[in-house]
Image (tube, helix red, strand yellow):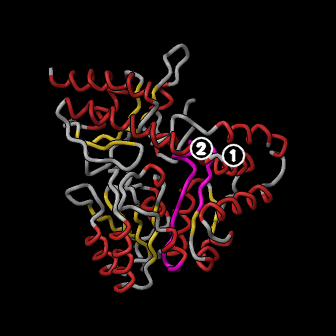
Amino acid sequence: MPAITARGLEASRDASRLRLIQPGAPAPIWLDSNENAYGPSPEALAAIQSAFGEACRYPGESEAALRDALAAEHKVKPENILLGSGSAESLRLCVSAFTAADRPLITAAPTFEDPGRYATTFRVPLVEVPVDGGLGLDLDGMLYAAAAQSAGLVFFCNPNNPTGTVHGAAATRDFVGRVRRLVPWTAILVDEAYHEFVQDRSYASMIPLALEDRRVVVARTFSKAYGMAGLRIGYAVAHADTIALLRPYRLNNANVLGAVAAVAALGARSRIPEQQRLNREALQLTRGHFERLGYRLGPSEGNFVFFDVRRDVSEFKESCLKHGVAVGRPFPPFTTHVRISMGTLDEMRKALPVFDEVLASRTQ
């Protein structure tokens, strides 16, 4: 089943996607937006079909049902949950609530750009701390920046997009504790969009910490493991007082069809291990292929890989597009690194020879 859309910039802004959709042309292979190409579960799709008749109604009841289902899933209270349009809305809410002209946003470079774009739109100072030599978040650097700049918010993407690196629970809690001691007013937004795909045993969700600490917010989404990017369902988990602080900045209700699909997806969570297995197999196939060609790929804890193709990534992306395969956008300052999302195993088997041809054409 094809993916729908994504929170990724390619899906909403990159005209290259439109160029691939041509009458009579082979179906494109979308490996650019970290979507789950297997799509929603059958239970979610059935729930959507059954709710078509409710599309004329406002989503109050369906939102309440989803909040209750999420509260049960995470063993929290409904007042600890705030729904949004994908997890992107949770990120915007936090930038709105916690930053100001004298309270900058601290992010990594590269990381998911939405918080930084919101800060720029709201004319909030943005401090980007380069990732470390292993492509992980530079926690000491981010701590120093938060303290030196009297930050309002630190964006902590874990696993990080696009690098795929993850910080374990102990390191994450230690970082939060150090921020709290140095700049107790600084909020920390932990983006766990790829939570379900993490294999590193040292990792754990920061939801328990968010329930204790009013300055910690965890963002989650149904766009990735649950395959519902086009339905735009995400949520924030935090202390009830923090949720109350964020709520006035909310712009969108969850849509009825997305909400009922999310409830059904939670009820069918036993399907998630299969999605995890398929993702692992695609990652192993892709990593092994490129490593045999001499490229170095680090471990990825998401549904994508990020590595150096030793050429301008914009050129590589454009060449792949000509063969019907879309890969990720450039992530400065890593201008020779490409992010390739995992499609289905069949899609990856079709895409790998395309990558071979494109890479070989440069060396001839």
Residue tagged by mark 1? 261
Verify CB contact (< 8 Å) between mark 2 and mark 1.
yes
Which residue occupies the foreground of this view, 52 or 104? 52
Which residue occupies the foreground of this view, 282 or 2? 282
Amino acid under label 1?
Ala
Q: Quadrant of the N terminus?
A: top right
Amino acid under label 2?
Met
Could you say which disc has been placed on residue 228 in the image?
2
Q: Is residue 146 magenta?
A: no
Residue extending farthest left: 364
Q: Residue at x 44, y 32 (%)?
A: 16
Kindly state the secondary structure of the residue where label 1 is placed.
helix
Q: Position of residue 130 (x, y in %)?
A: 26, 61
In the shown orientation, is residue 332 left or right of residue 103? Answer: left
In the shown orientation, is residue 313 left or right of residue 133? Answer: right
Q: Residue at x 35, y 27 (%)?
A: 320
Mark 1 crowd level (few <14, some 14–19, many ≥20, 10 Å Cα): many
Which residue occupies the foreground of this view, 324 or 269? 269
Q: Quadrant of residue 290?
A: top left
Q: Residue at x 51, y 35 (%)?
A: 37
Q: Position of residue 192 (x, y in %)?
A: 47, 58
Could one spot residue 222 in this view of the protein? yes
Q: Position of residue 292 (x, y in %)?
A: 20, 30
Q: Position of residue 78 (x, y in %)?
A: 68, 69
Q: Which residue range is magenta in the image? A: 212-235
Sooner in the amino-acid sequence: mark 2 or mark 1: 2
Q: Quadrant of the C terminus?
A: top left
- Above or below, 130 relative to 79: above
